[in-house]
Amino acid sequence: MFRRWFKRQLEGDRTRELLIAPSLPEIAVDEVRQFIVEDDGVPHINWAVAAAWIDVHAEDPAMYPVFQRAIAAKWLDEIHDMVAYETMRWRSALVEGLAPTRDSAASRLEVWSLRALHDITTSLDPIHDGALPGPVIIFATRSSDAYYSFIAHFYDEGVHGGSGGIYLGAEHNAFPMLVIDGSVTWGIEAVVVHELTHHALAGCRLPLWAEEGLTQMMEERIAGGRPFLMNSEIMDRHRALWSDIGFGPFTSGIAFGSAERDQQELAYHLALAMTRSLLERRASDFFAFARACRDNTHEDAAREHLGRPAAEIAAALLDL
Ligand SMILES: [Zn+2]
């Protein structure tokens, strides 16, 4: 039903590209079980062991990602069969999904992931030259407890966490995965959009301020939510913080994970303010900067395409 709705809403090649799931090589479930490790009762894939197995079994190295996806799919099938509550497994061109059916979480995630990937990839075409990101797992837990037990396995590995969801990238040969707290029914769409934007930007090597600026803009654009606000009170808080600590923690990305003062909140807010302002006034320069970050330092890319380093752009924006 949702697929029909999706097809009606969005027409064109990109929609077809996102809907058609590839066929995967058949891998016996016993083979996959040897890659599964339990941590606190939760089954995870040991991707390093899986990678060694794929090296032996995939004759053509180009088939590596397909085998990896087949293992990820089988692992989700196993969880689907194992859990005591009702879940839905789904597959589209870029998504291997598993979510509880309660409160329509699974069907909402299926349709929202398609819609979000459509809009995100279309908006980011100037950065990617039209190429689609690779496939990703979307796994929603049934409760907040299950969500935190699951993601505890990955802490300290460079993860990007949003409220209610987290994106785990392809580090250490892992298949990328978006984990969602499926009990958070309000705002789940914004979580999907935010974390899928991180996935779409993986490998672009953007500075965190630009990446978090784009993830928040996509949330606003696709999932709606609170309008962006920059009033005199927030402006005063920004000036007080950044004139005290400098923009180093902002441009390096440290402030985004900081528990000190209101650094994290203001870093996300400033990232959104800066990215919005650059995209509104100088979209082609911003996209040129984003493309240049792949092969240049952030500083050089900013100087060349934005005319000055990020710290100076931030200072000008806040009139500091
Ligand atoms: Zn984020």
Image (cartoon, grey):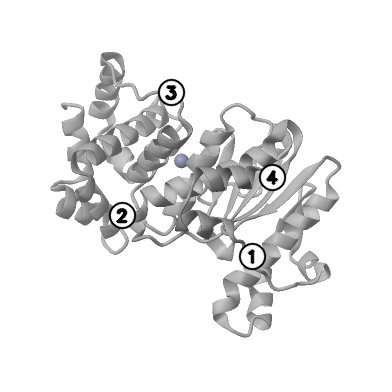
Q: Earlier in the sequence, mark 1 or mark 3?
A: 1
Depth-wise, is mark 4 or mark 2 nearer the camera?
2
Cα distance between the residues tagged 2 and 3: 26 Å
Rendered position, 19 above or below 191:
below
* Residue 20 vertical position relative to residue 214 in the rendered view, above or below: below
* Residue type (three-letter) at the residue carrying disc 1: Arg
Q: Determine contact: label 1, label 3, CB under 8 Å.
A: no
Q: CA distance from mark 4 to mark 1?
A: 20 Å
* Residue 226: assigned label: 3
Is disc 3 surrounded by few (<14), some (14 to 19) or many (20+) residues within 10 Å? few
Question: Is 217 on the left-hand or right-hand side of 77?
Answer: left
Tell me the residue that label 1 is attached to: 69
Q: Is the CB atom of the residue marked by disc 2 within 8 angstroms of ligand 1's nearest atom? A: no
Disc on the earlier residue, 4 or 2: 2
Q: Secondary structure at mark 2?
A: helix
> What amino acid does circle 2 point to?
Pro
Please name the residue that numbered disc 4 is placed on: 150
Mark 3 or mark 4: whose residue is earlier in sequence: 4
Q: Earlier in the sequence, mark 2 or mark 3?
A: 2
